[in-house]
Amino acid sequence: MPVISLIIPCYNEEKSIPLFYDEIIKVSKQLSKYTFEYIFVDDGSFDKTLSVLKSLNEKDEKVKYLSFSRNFGKEAAMYAGLKTSSGSYVAVIDVDLQDPPNMLIEMVQILEQGEYDAVAARRVSRKGEPPIRSFFARAFYNIFNKMSKTNIVDGARDYRLMTRQMVNSILELEEVNRFSKGIFGWVGYSTKWLTYQNIERVKGETKWSFFKLLIYSIEGIVAFSTVPLAIASFIGIIFFMLSIVAAIFIIIREFIWQGSAYGWASMVAIIFGVSGIQLFCIGIIGQYLSKTYLEVKKRPLYIVKAKSDQ
C-alpha cells in the first residue's frame, strides 16, 4: 500500500497531541487505501510532550517521533521530519488543529489526478488575530513578493501535501537559514491552493509572538532577496546628492547674507540624519553577512536526542 507521511512539529504541545491524534485517525480511516506514518518532531519541549509521544508510539506503531536536544525552531523540525519521511506523499501539518486534518482527503484526491505536485492551504481570513498582527502579516506578503522573484501567496500556511519528487528537491537545499514558505515556492512545481477560514488553537497558546514573527519575516526577506542591499545603496546615493545640494545652498546663502552658514542646530540635524542612514545601510549589510557567517560554519540544523525505534 502507498504511504502518506505526516510531519507534525511540536513544541510544548502535551495537551494538543492526543486531540490531534484522534482527529487524524478519523481522517486516515477515510483514506483506507493508504498506509500512514505520523512523524512527530519534538522541538526541545520542556513539558510532557515527549512522554505523550512515547505513549502513542507504544500504542500505535505508525507513530514515530524525533526529540531535539533543545529548541531549534519549527524550520529545523520540518526539515528533520522531511528527511525522516518515506511516503510517496508527504504533508506538513500543525498539531494545534489550526490546520484542518480533514482537508487531507481533498488534498490526496487532487494529487491522485496527477495534474499537481503539491496541494497547499491558505487562510482567507484572520479572525481571532489582533488587528495589528494581521496588518503586518499582509504587509509582509506584499513586501516579500515585490522584493523577491519567489512568490508567496497571501495567507499561505506550511500545511501542504507534496509528492516525493518535490520533497526530494526541497531536501537538496541544505541551507541553515531556512524559510520554508520561500523554499516551497523556489523549488517550483505546480501547486493547487485550497482556502479555508482561520481556526483558533484547540489547546494552549501560540508560540509565535509578534516579535518572533517580525524576526522571522526579516529572515525570510533576506533569505530570498538582495533588493534590501540595492535599497541601501540607493538611499546612500540620494543622501549624498542631497548633501551636495545642501552644501551649494549654504555657500550661496553665505555669499548673499554673510554669516548665515553658522548654527549648531542645523549641523546636528544633518549629522543625525546622515548617521542614521549610514547605520540603517550597515544594518542591512550586516544581516547578509551574518547569514553568510552562519552558513559557512556548517553547523547541523538540529541535534536529535531521542527517537522512536522503528
Image (spheres, rainbow, N blue to C red):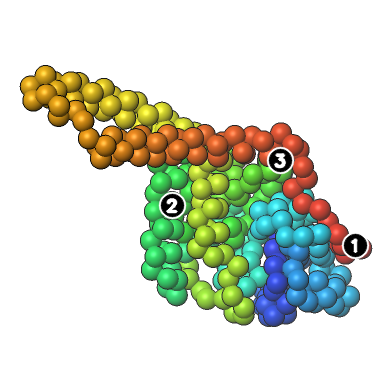
Residue displayed at 39% across by 53% down: 139
* 246 relative to 8 in the view: left or right: left
Residue displayed at 58% across by 71% down: 206
97 in relation to 67, above or below? below
Q: What element carries label 1?
A: loop
What amino acid is at disc 1?
Gln
Can the viewer see residue 71 in this picture? yes
C-alpha distance separating marks 1 and 2: 41 Å
Residue hosting label 2: 140
Tell me residue 180's x, y (percent).
Answer: 60, 49
Tell me residue 176's x, y (percent).
Answer: 69, 43
Category of crowding for the residue at label 2, using alpha-carbon neighbours closer than 10 angstroms: few (below 14), some (14–19), many (at least 20): some
Q: Depth check: 283 or 143 in front? A: 283
Q: What element carries label 2?
A: helix
Q: Nearer the viewer, mark 1 or mark 3?
A: 3
Q: Depth check: 265 or 9 in front? A: 265
Res. 174 mark: 3
C-alpha distance separating marks 1 and 3: 25 Å
* 237 relative to 111 in the view: left or right: left
Can the viewer see residue 109 in this picture? no
What amino acid is at disc 2?
Phe
C-alpha distance separating marks 3 and 2: 25 Å
Residue displayed at 61% across by 55% down: 111
Tell me residue 173's x, y (percent).
Answer: 68, 39
Category of crowding for the residue at label 1, using alpha-carbon neighbours closer than 10 angstroms: few (below 14), some (14–19), many (at least 20): few
Residue hosting label 1: 310
